[in-house]
Amino acid sequence: MMADYQQILDRLYTHLRPMAPQGTRLGEDTDLISEFGLDSVNVMDLLLEVEEDFDISVPLNLLADIRTPKDLARAIVRLLEAG
């Protein structure tokens, strides 16, 4: 599963890099709200990209538990395994 997790995280980074403010470090524990400054529109755009890329549907109730790329990657792993 670790390889799957890392592959998912790498794919997430391709979606997140264009949203990163200049000079912001992107890592597993980067806070997407406070460090990246994502607002609700950015989050929804990201979700749409992720759903299309991974061919999954992310339940909106999961958003409350997602603060970092690591959180999102773990959620995607669970959704893919359940899928």
Image (cartoon, rainbow, N blue to C red):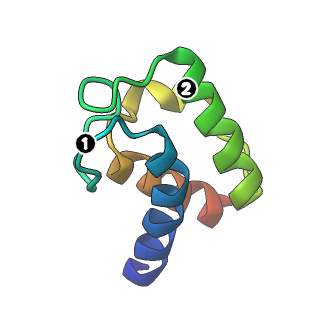
Instruction: Please tell me which residue is depicted at 49% across the width and 75% down the height of the picture.
Output: 7
Residue that label 1 marks:
24
Position of residue 61 relative to residue 14, above or below, is above
Q: In the image, is 39 to the left or to the right of 51?
A: left
Residue placed at 69% from the left, 60% from the top?
A: 54
Q: Which mark is residue 57?
A: none
Which residue: 25% across, 24% down?
34
User: What residue did someone put label 2 on?
Assistant: 42
In the image, residue 45 above or below residue 49: above
Quarter of the picture containing the C terminus is bottom right
Residue farthest along the top direction in this orientation: 40
Query: Would residue 10 be found to the left or right of residue 81 on screen?
Result: left
Q: Secondary structure at mark 2?
A: helix
- The residue sitting at 55% across, 51% down in the picture is 15
Quadrant position of residue 66: top left
- x then y, percent, for residue 3: 42, 83
Q: Which SS class for mark 1?
A: loop
Amino acid type of the residue that numbered disc 1 sits on in the rendered structure = Thr
> What is the tally of numbered marks visible in this picture?
2
Badge 2 or badge 1: first in the primary sequence: 1
Which kind of residue does numbered mark 2 sit on? Asn
- For this rendering, which residue is in front, 74 or 8? 8
